[in-house]
Amino acid sequence: MAALAVVALAAGFVFTPPRNVTPERRQCVRMAAEFYHRPSDVLSVDGLEMLVHVVLDKEHGKIGQKVYNKPNKKGVRTYDIGPMQINSGNLYELGKRGVTEEQILNNECANIFVGTMILQEGIASAPDLWTGIGKYNAWTDRENGRKYYMDVWNRLNHSWGRN
Protein backbone atom coordinates (compact mmCIF):
# COMPACT_ATOMS: atom_id res chain seq x y z
CA MET A 1 0.00 0.00 0.00
CA ALA A 2 2.60 2.56 1.07
CA ALA A 3 4.86 1.82 -1.91
CA LEU A 4 2.01 2.48 -4.33
CA ALA A 5 1.17 5.77 -2.66
CA VAL A 6 4.81 6.90 -2.75
CA VAL A 7 4.92 6.18 -6.49
CA ALA A 8 1.66 8.07 -7.00
CA LEU A 9 2.80 11.10 -4.99
CA ALA A 10 6.28 11.11 -6.52
CA ALA A 11 4.96 10.74 -10.06
CA GLY A 12 2.52 13.60 -9.56
CA PHE A 13 -0.64 11.70 -10.47
CA VAL A 14 -3.42 13.96 -11.67
CA PHE A 15 -5.08 15.45 -8.64
CA THR A 16 -8.00 17.84 -8.46
CA PRO A 17 -8.18 19.96 -5.30
CA PRO A 18 -11.60 20.13 -3.67
CA ARG A 19 -14.03 22.19 -5.75
CA ASN A 20 -14.46 24.84 -3.06
CA VAL A 21 -10.78 25.86 -3.13
CA THR A 22 -10.31 29.48 -4.16
CA PRO A 23 -7.81 30.43 -6.88
CA GLU A 24 -5.84 32.33 -4.21
CA ARG A 25 -5.54 29.21 -2.04
CA ARG A 26 -4.50 27.09 -5.03
CA GLN A 27 -1.82 29.62 -5.92
CA CYS A 28 -0.57 29.81 -2.33
CA VAL A 29 -0.39 26.02 -1.98
CA ARG A 30 1.52 25.77 -5.25
CA MET A 31 3.99 28.48 -4.17
CA ALA A 32 4.52 26.80 -0.77
CA ALA A 33 5.11 23.41 -2.43
CA GLU A 34 7.62 24.95 -4.82
CA PHE A 35 9.36 26.84 -2.02
CA TYR A 36 9.73 23.88 0.36
CA HIS A 37 10.44 21.18 -2.22
CA ARG A 38 14.03 19.94 -2.44
CA PRO A 39 15.45 17.95 -5.38
CA SER A 40 16.31 15.07 -3.04
CA ASP A 41 12.72 14.79 -1.75
CA VAL A 42 10.77 11.59 -2.24
CA LEU A 43 7.82 13.77 -3.32
CA SER A 44 7.67 15.78 -6.51
CA VAL A 45 6.52 19.40 -6.29
CA ASP A 46 3.14 18.24 -7.60
CA GLY A 47 3.06 15.46 -4.99
CA LEU A 48 3.79 17.90 -2.17
CA GLU A 49 1.15 20.28 -3.53
CA MET A 50 -1.40 17.45 -3.59
CA LEU A 51 -0.47 16.43 -0.06
CA VAL A 52 -0.88 19.99 1.26
CA HIS A 53 -4.36 20.20 -0.31
CA VAL A 54 -5.30 16.92 1.37
CA VAL A 55 -3.97 18.09 4.75
CA LEU A 56 -5.92 21.35 4.38
CA ASP A 57 -9.05 19.37 3.59
CA LYS A 58 -8.47 17.04 6.55
CA GLU A 59 -7.66 19.81 9.04
CA HIS A 60 -10.60 21.90 7.83
CA GLY A 61 -9.45 25.01 9.68
CA LYS A 62 -10.43 28.58 8.90
CA ILE A 63 -8.79 31.98 9.00
CA GLY A 64 -8.95 33.44 12.50
CA GLN A 65 -9.89 30.08 14.04
CA LYS A 66 -8.33 28.50 17.12
CA VAL A 67 -9.46 25.03 18.11
CA TYR A 68 -8.57 23.98 21.64
CA ASN A 69 -7.41 20.40 22.17
CA LYS A 70 -7.94 18.11 25.14
CA PRO A 71 -5.08 18.21 27.64
CA ASN A 72 -2.25 15.82 26.78
CA LYS A 73 -0.78 13.20 29.14
CA LYS A 74 1.18 15.94 30.92
CA GLY A 75 -1.94 18.07 31.37
CA VAL A 76 -0.88 20.65 28.77
CA ARG A 77 -3.69 22.03 26.65
CA THR A 78 -2.69 23.30 23.22
CA TYR A 79 -4.73 24.74 20.39
CA ASP A 80 -4.64 24.54 16.61
CA ILE A 81 -4.44 27.67 14.48
CA GLY A 82 -5.95 28.61 11.13
CA PRO A 83 -6.53 26.64 7.91
CA MET A 84 -3.77 24.05 8.43
CA GLN A 85 -4.53 23.86 12.17
CA ILE A 86 -0.91 24.55 13.18
CA ASN A 87 -0.47 23.43 16.77
CA SER A 88 0.38 26.14 19.29
CA GLY A 89 3.21 23.95 20.52
CA ASN A 90 5.10 25.12 17.43
CA LEU A 91 4.87 28.83 18.32
CA TYR A 92 8.15 29.03 20.24
CA GLU A 93 10.20 27.59 17.36
CA LEU A 94 8.25 29.62 14.82
CA GLY A 95 8.99 32.77 16.82
CA LYS A 96 12.71 32.07 16.43
CA ARG A 97 12.07 32.21 12.67
CA GLY A 98 10.22 35.50 12.90
CA VAL A 99 6.74 33.99 12.53
CA THR A 100 4.03 35.25 14.87
CA GLU A 101 0.77 33.67 15.96
CA GLU A 102 -1.06 36.67 14.49
CA GLN A 103 0.41 35.94 11.05
CA ILE A 104 -0.62 32.29 10.95
CA LEU A 105 -3.99 33.03 12.54
CA ASN A 106 -5.11 35.78 10.19
CA ASN A 107 -3.14 35.30 6.95
CA GLU A 108 -4.20 32.23 4.99
CA CYS A 109 -1.11 32.10 2.81
CA ALA A 110 1.26 32.53 5.78
CA ASN A 111 -0.57 29.69 7.51
CA ILE A 112 -0.23 27.47 4.43
CA PHE A 113 3.48 28.26 4.05
CA VAL A 114 4.18 27.50 7.72
CA GLY A 115 2.03 24.35 7.64
CA THR A 116 3.85 23.16 4.52
CA MET A 117 7.19 23.81 6.23
CA ILE A 118 6.13 21.78 9.29
CA LEU A 119 4.81 18.98 7.07
CA GLN A 120 8.02 18.92 5.02
CA GLU A 121 10.22 18.93 8.14
CA GLY A 122 8.27 15.96 9.51
CA ILE A 123 8.72 14.05 6.27
CA ALA A 124 12.43 14.91 6.08
CA SER A 125 13.05 13.75 9.66
CA ALA A 126 11.15 10.46 9.42
CA PRO A 127 12.35 7.06 8.27
CA ASP A 128 9.59 6.93 5.64
CA LEU A 129 7.05 9.18 3.95
CA TRP A 130 3.99 7.97 5.88
CA THR A 131 5.59 8.30 9.29
CA GLY A 132 6.58 11.83 8.25
CA ILE A 133 3.02 12.65 7.25
CA GLY A 134 1.83 11.33 10.62
CA LYS A 135 4.26 13.68 12.36
CA TYR A 136 2.23 16.65 11.10
CA ASN A 137 -0.44 15.69 13.61
CA ALA A 138 1.47 13.78 16.25
CA TRP A 139 5.20 14.46 16.37
CA THR A 140 5.97 11.86 19.03
CA ASP A 141 2.85 9.68 19.35
CA ARG A 142 3.30 6.92 16.76
CA GLU A 143 -0.23 5.50 17.11
CA ASN A 144 -1.90 8.89 16.58
CA GLY A 145 0.52 9.52 13.73
CA ARG A 146 -0.50 6.22 12.15
CA LYS A 147 -4.19 7.11 12.44
CA TYR A 148 -3.46 10.48 10.87
CA TYR A 149 -1.53 9.13 7.89
CA MET A 150 -4.15 6.43 7.30
CA ASP A 151 -6.80 9.14 7.08
CA VAL A 152 -4.58 11.10 4.66
CA TRP A 153 -4.12 7.91 2.63
CA ASN A 154 -7.91 7.42 2.44
CA ARG A 155 -8.43 11.03 1.41
CA LEU A 156 -5.78 10.71 -1.30
CA ASN A 157 -7.51 7.60 -2.64
CA HIS A 158 -10.83 9.44 -2.62
CA SER A 159 -9.26 12.39 -4.47
CA TRP A 160 -7.78 10.14 -7.16
CA GLY A 161 -11.16 8.47 -7.53
CA ARG A 162 -12.72 11.78 -8.63
CA ASN A 163 -10.42 12.11 -11.67
Image (spheres, grey):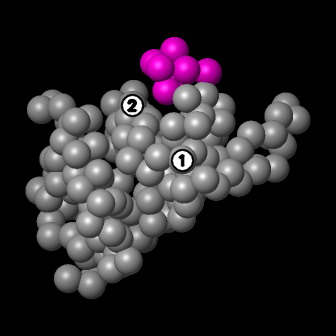
- For residue 36, above or below residue 58: above
Classify the position of the C terminus by image quarter. bottom left
- Percent x, y of residue 56: 44, 59
- Mark linked to residue 121: 2
Badge 1 element: helix
Q: Residue furthest top?
A: 96
Task: Indicate yes or no whether the magenta region holds residue 95.
Answer: yes
Q: Which of the two residues, 107 or 30, is positioned nearer the viewer here? A: 107
Q: Residue furthest right?
A: 75
For the stretch drawn in magenta, what is the main secondary structure? helix
Q: Is residue 97 left or right of residue 32?
A: right
Task: Indicate yes or no whether the magenta region holds residue 141.
Answer: no
Q: Amino acid at mark 2?
A: Glu
The structure residue drawn at horizontal position 19% and vertical position 42%, both measured from the top left corner, is 34
Question: Hey, which quadrant is residue 31 in on the image?
Answer: top left
The structure residue drawn at horizontal position 33% and vertical position 59%, both measured from the top left corner, is 25
| Of labels 2 and 1, the one closer to you | 1
The structure residue drawn at horizontal position 51% and vertical position 15%, both measured from the top left corner, is 96
Classify the position of the N terminus by image quarter. bottom left
Alpha carbon of mark 2 to alpha carbon of mark 1: how far? Answer: 23 Å
The structure residue drawn at horizontal position 33% and vertical position 80%, both measured from the top left corner, is 19
Label 2 vs 1, first from the N-terminus: 1
For label 2, the crowd category at 10 Å Cα-Cα, with few meaning under 14, some 14 to 19 and many 20 or more, is: some
Q: Inspect this view and state whether residue 56 appears.
A: yes
Q: Are marks 2 and 1 in contact (CB under 8 Å)?
A: no
Q: Is residue 89 left or right of residue 119?
A: right
- Mark linked to residue 106: 1
Q: Which residues are magenta?
A: 92-99
Badge 2 element: helix
Q: Is residue 35 left or right of residue 87?
A: left
- Percent x, y of residue 28: 29, 51
